Image (spheres, rainbow, N blue to C red):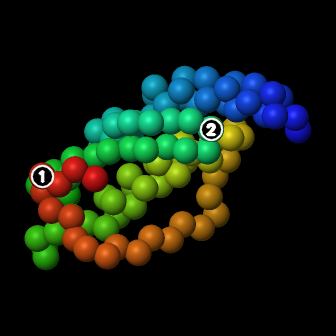
Amino acid sequence: MADAETKSKNKGNLTALMEKMEGEPIASFYKIKVLELSAGYAKVSMKMLPEYVNFNGVVFGSIIMAMADYAFSLAINSMSLPSLATQFNIHLLSPAAPGDVL
């Protein structure tokens, strides 16, 4: 695909994706903020709340995975709609605590 054609297609995908993002319940539930979004790239942020803490006193890994999965879904769907993952791996190197902003 020619460069201008690719840019045009990606712009259309971004427009469609931004419309779909408005009604995304999981992002609203976790209060995930989209900081940046471009073709193939998404940067999100989320504040860790006390409700996300497990019995070990750290944020559940699944909460962090949800945020990472949302960022991934935005990045991949900015290139081609619809797109989805068949496998998702993450290595949690240090714990998150309430009040942290990831």
Q: Type of residue at label 2?
A: Ala
59 left or right of 89? left
59 left or right of 84? left
- Read off the residue under disc 2: 39
**Which image quarter: residue 32?**
top left
Tag 1 secondary structure: loop
Q: Residue furthest front?
A: 3
Vertical comparison of 21 with 102: above or below: above
Circles 2 and 1: CB atoms closer than 8 Å: no
Q: Residue furthest right?
A: 1
Q: Residue at the spot x=16%, y=69% of the render?
A: 58
Vertical comparison of 50 with 39: above or below: below
Q: Type of residue at label 1?
A: Gly
Across and down, in percent, residue 82 comes to: 69, 41
Look at the image and tell me whether residue 69 can be seen: yes
Across and down, in percent, residue 2 comes to: 87, 35
Q: Earlier in the sequence, mark 2 or mark 1?
A: 2
Q: Nearer the viewer, residue 78 or 65?
A: 78
Q: Residue at the spot x=21%, y=64% of the render?
A: 96
Across and down, in percent, residue 70 comes to: 46, 48
Across and down, in percent, residue 56 comes to: 13, 76
- Read off the residue under disc 1: 99
81 left or right of 96? right
**Which image quarter: residue 39?**
top right
Look at the image and tell me whether residue 29 can be seen: no
Q: Nearer the viewer, residue 28 or 3?
A: 3
Q: Quadrant of the N terminus?
A: top right
- How far apart are the alpha carbons under marks 2 and 1? 31 Å
* Tag in front: 2 or 1: 2
How many residues crowd mark 1 within 10 Å: few (<14), some (14–19), many (20+)? few
